[in-house]
Image (cartoon, helix red, strand yellow):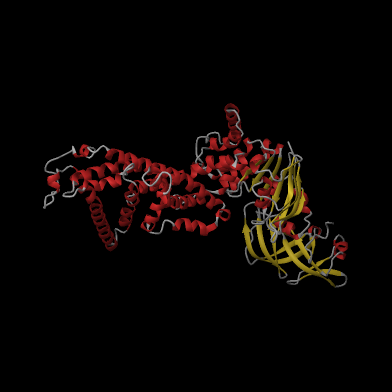
Amino acid sequence: MTMGETSSRHASTARPKDAWRYVRILFIAFLVLWLAFTLFPLYFMTITAFKTAAETNLTTPTFWPQDWQPANFLGVFAERTNFNALIDSFIIATCNTALALFLGSLAGYAFARFPRQAGGENLAFWILSNRMFPPVAILVPMFFLFDITPWGTDSHISLILLYLVFNLPLATWLMMVFFRDAPVELEEAAYLDGWTPLRAFVKVTLPLVLPGMISVAMLCWIFAWNEYLFANLFVGTAVRTYTIVIPTFTHGSQTLWNLQMAFSLIAMIPPVVLFILLRRYMVRGLSLGVVKG
Amino acid sequence: MARLEVERICKGWEFPVIDELSFTVEEGEFFVIVGASGIGKTTLLRLISGLETPDAGRVVVGGRDLTGIPPYRRSIAMTFESYALYPHLTVYENMASPLRARRLPVRERDRRILATAKLLRIDHLLERRPGEISGGQKQRTALGRTLVADPEVFLLDEPISHLDAKIRHELRTQFHTLEDLRKVATVYVTHDYAEALSLGDRIGVMGAGGKLVQIGAPRDLFERPQTLAVAEHLGQPTINVIPARIIDDDGPCLQSEEGTLRLPVTDFARPLLEKLQGRQVILGLRPQYLRPGHDDTRGLTLRADIDIYEPLGTLGIMLVRCEGVRMTAVTDPEMTYHSGETVTLTLDLDQLFYFDAVTEKNLAVGD
């Protein structure tokens, strides 16, 4: 406790000690407020998921379910295709992430190690700039573009490829930064040990950037998992992502808030589990560029 | 086993880092290249190892021209100044890397690593990662990784420069006893002249402009430096450099450019000074030949004022002003001096070097 030490060091002079205490109290109060603000939507989602449809439509909202309805979580799968939507989302997000990571690593490595041959800073920046324009700008052109492909728009592969537009620049740029931080000398040492460039890459460089790579994978996967805009326009019949299933709980006359929230909670499970499993790597990866050596 | 030949190797056109540099290292020879920081020593090693391609010239190992052969197909091992240990692997795995690359059977691999680790006294660290061991241990691991590889040529890039003095000396002595290192051609690069003199069978002094200024046995370099630069680089404290000119005062004598120091021309120096192109000469005098005391048989006695006195335990170093010329003298540790004191010094005239002021070449060493 650095703060505790500091305040005890100033114990003889009363003023700084008091000042520190007020700062701490204010700080903690701010954190508590912040926590409440962040957790409230999640809390309301959860209790709504357990309410009856009638209770969700009360003019005075209740903050604790009057009648617990755990069956809501089964109810959302009354429509069998709803479960398939989660599977479809999973396939799309996972394949897209794998592809973005593979291509992004190769491109990032090229930009990091052979910048001139790879096209230089300008090309690298152009790739990143693809991430900067509003996605909706290319919505309609992309639809027509994918419409003339053999697999059409309503397929897994269309979204897997389309999401590369957003994820590949991110993966390339971040992997470039991670590769730049991985010392070239280690690769050179590996060459002198007798490893060919490809084996040196796999044995030495890849393990060094692995934490970074896992962070990139998380970011890409979560983006692809949560994407709604393009999915809504592109797929819907043969393939459905869970994001376009959520609005279907809104009917002409009423919205089944309880089912919608239950389904949303279920859809939150995969990213949360993934995050908990890979959390350690993620933190290391995001700080990889900050702390050297 | 093989000898290493570097033939007229060049790197960099407009500003050459390495310029038509040639040398040969025999099998079993320990060749030390010494030179100031940033003068191109590491580049030279990178050219030999194949990490960089020379613009001209070639590297030959055991009669085989290595031009165009990538580093991973050369039998050359190199330690890096930064050690370049793989941080995600243990000491054992680091040392196993060159053997894995060659797909050596596991049992043979274990045997070799254990033997080398014992030799370097890191056998108790095999399961640790580089982040968990000290600088000296890292250096031993890096050395171990090159030793187990059993290469034809060893390249060592400032292997002990970044360690503290005690470990540096301990490792330096270990280099003498490592037989694997003494079996093959070794090129050892350092900026520390003491390492060079201690370890080298032969030494090459690298000067500005990417050339080897002088190659020779340690003693030879120390006693017969070809140029002023070599004399300045070898030896601690640094040699005294006194620019002077020849004047006529009842026969020739040497007058310092700065101050009023006047030295007689000895019989040894007379023919040398005739070789001078102008009348300017640069005198070099190692500090150990300027000692306190009165000794007419050994040379010239001078009065000097002490500017700074450094008692260093095994010796003392005094910076003095002697008739207006700043010089360094070495004293015995038992004696105590104080700044501002006046002392009598004896300058050994027979130990003077004479360099041409224009070419900075040693007049006593023929080309």
Position of residue B313 relative to residue B340, above or below, is above
- Pick whichever, A99 or B104, lies toward us: A99
Q: Position of residue A192 (x, y in %)?
A: 62, 42
User: In the visual, does B39 lie left or right of B279?
Assistant: left
Q: Position of residue A139 (x, y in %)?
A: 37, 55
Position of residue A140 relative to residue A98, above or below, is below
Quarter placement of the C terminus of chain B: bottom right
Position of residue B41 relative to residue B129, above or below, is below
User: In the visual, does B253 lie left or right of B200?
Assistant: right
Asked whether residue A153 appears in the rendered view, the answer is yes
Q: How many marks?
A: 0
Task: Indicate the quadrant where residue B327 lies.
Answer: bottom right
- Pick whichever, A28 or B329, lies toward us: A28
Which residue: 83% across, 70% down?
A: B279
Q: Position of residue B299 (x, y in %)?
A: 80, 60
Quarter placement of the N terminus of chain B: top right
User: In the visual, does A104 lie left or right of A262?
Assistant: right
Task: Indicate the quadrant where residue B83 lies.
Answer: top right
Q: Position of residue B151 (x, y in %)?
A: 67, 37
Asked whether residue A163 appears in the rendered view, the answer is no
Task: Indicate the quadrant where residue B256 lies.
Answer: bottom right
